[in-house]
Amino acid sequence: MASGARIEAFLEMMAAERGASDNTLSSYRRDLEDADEYMGGGLAMADSAAIRGWLSDLARRSYTASTQARKLSSLRQFFKFLYAEGLRGDDPTGVLDSPKKARSLPKTLAEDEVGRLLRRAEEEVAQAEPGSPERFAARRLHTLLEVLYASGMRVSELVSLPVRVAQRDERFFSIKGKGGKERLVPLSSKAREAVRLWLAERRLDKAALESPWLFPARSDSGFLPRQIFARELKGLAARAGIATAKVSPHVLRHAFASHLLQNGADLRAVQQLLGHSDISTTQIYTHVLEKRLQELVQKHHPLAD
């Protein structure tokens, strides 16, 4: 059976047994026919070296690493089918690694931009009528911002904080992160003051007072949905004159980490504060360290310009 016929048999199986959509089948067909053309019609009998050559050709044709990985995935499915049907005794893709995607740098905000956000949030609290729903919402948003920037918590960790962690008025919150792992996150004096004022505001609302959550809401979970926080944060950014596309709770978490490193923090310490189980996850911030080291050399090396 020629490669073309085997490709057709594979596509028929994907449609009949896996219920693959027309778009998925078209994508598989393009990938397999492209590889088959590169190999002169010999895809079904190709070895690992031939597939590596095809991947190199994709790179020369300026396909991104993610697209190369997707196309290789199509070949993996094809050869798995041939092996299962007894049409091949091996899988040449089994020893191949997927092309690695370049890790994009995290979006972040400059220190002065975070300062503008915090100042605007504080101003809106002062402008709202005491005891009004507007005051409640403004105080909550200001507290969320202060705590997030002070601690670098994940937004899911922040909005689901139990109220008991805040009633101790300590310099740290003890929180449960991914996998149920507990860690301590710091609170600045401004964040602690924001929490204190929020608790006082919260006591004025009977429904909030009876909730076990620090940031209660009328939702299925009982606490503020992260989507609501994200929406309110973008609104605040617009009012502070900052492009809304630049701002999200996750961006503020990145700002926390980046600003710590810019000001001399150790990467391992930032890893612990962010709750990363592996240092490799935190290494997306090494561009900050590299910049700091360059500035250090330029400033202190006797032969620097």
Image: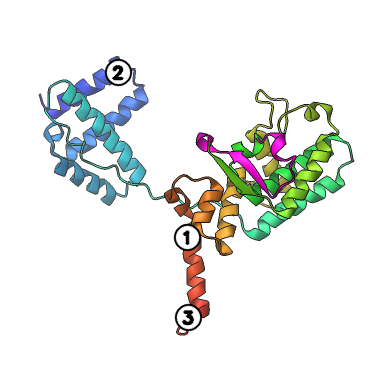
- Judging depth in this view, the residue of 156 and 266 nearest the camera is 266
Rendering coords of residue 41 (x, y %): 13, 35
Question: Who is closer to the viewer here, 108 or 70?
Answer: 108
Q: Quadrant of the image for the N terminus?
A: top left
Type of the residue with mark 3: His
Q: Give the farthest residue toward the bottom.
A: 302
Instruction: Name the N-terminal-most of marks 2 and 1.
Output: 2
Binning the other alpha carbons within 10 Å of mark 2 as few (below 14), some (14 to 19) or many (20 upward) gives some
Image position of 224 (left or right of 47): right
Dot 2 amino acid type: Ala
Observer able to see residue 82: yes
Range of residues picked out in magenta: 161-180
- Residue 227 is covered by the magenta coloring: no
| Residue 8 falls left or right of residue 64 | left
Q: Residues within 10 Å of mark 1 (few under 14, many from 20)?
A: few
Marked residue nearer the N-terminal end (3 or 2): 2
Q: Dot 1: what SS? A: helix
Instruction: In the rendered structure, find residue 287 and report the number of the disc placed on it.
Output: 1
Residue 179 in magenta stretch: yes
In this view, the mark in front (3 or 1):
3
The one of 88 and 141 positioned closer to us in this rendering: 141
Alpha carbons under labels 2 and 1: distance apart: 46 Å
Callout 2 secondary element:
helix
Where is residue 98 shown, x and y percent of the image? 29, 42
The residue where tag 2 is placed is 15
Q: Which residue is most to the right?
A: 130
- Is the residue 152 above or below the residue 230 in the image? below
Q: Dot 3 corresponds to which residue?
A: 301
Q: Quick one: SS at disc 3?
A: loop
